[in-house]
Amino acid sequence: MKAEFDTAESNRLLRLAATHADIIAFPGGWANTTGDALQLAGIAQMEERIGYVRGLLGDRADAVEN
């Protein structure tokens, strides 16, 4: 079974973190939709997630650790 990344859910959590958090951690992987398998994120996926958060941070980018 191929693991699938729930981008909508992830984006919602990252938007919340970008709005309120001073430190944002990226887990580097995710569980599939049934929760029975884990998938590690590749470099491109991590770069995309970090870039997404940096874009959301705007003026807060220098004040937030990620």
Image (spheres, rainbow, N blue to C red):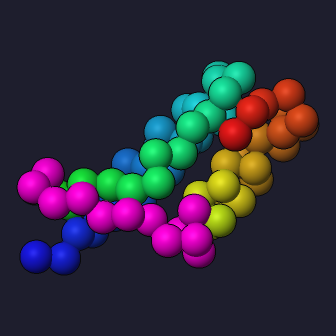
Comparing 15 with 35, the one in front is 35
Residue 49 left/right relative to 2: right
Residue drawn at x 62%, y 34% is 24
Q: Position of residue 38 (x, y in %)?
A: 24, 59
Up the image or down, 57 lies above or below 4; here it is: above
Residue drawn at x 30%, y 64% is 39
| First to last magenta residue range | 35-46
Residue 42 belongs to magenta span: yes
Residue 59 left/right relative to 33: right
Q: Position of residue 61 (x, y in %)?
A: 84, 39
Residue 48 belongs to magenta span: no
Confirm whether residue 8 shows in the render. no
Up the image or down, 65 lies above or below 56; here it is: above
Residue drawn at x 57%, y 62% is 46
Confirm whether residue 56 shows in the render. yes
Q: Position of residue 51 (x, y in %)?
A: 71, 59
- Which image quarter: residue 31? bottom left
Comparing 50 with 12, the one in front is 50
Up the image or down, 16 lies above or below 8; here it is: above
Residue drawn at x 38%, y 49% is 9
Pick the quarter of the image with the N terminus.
Answer: bottom left
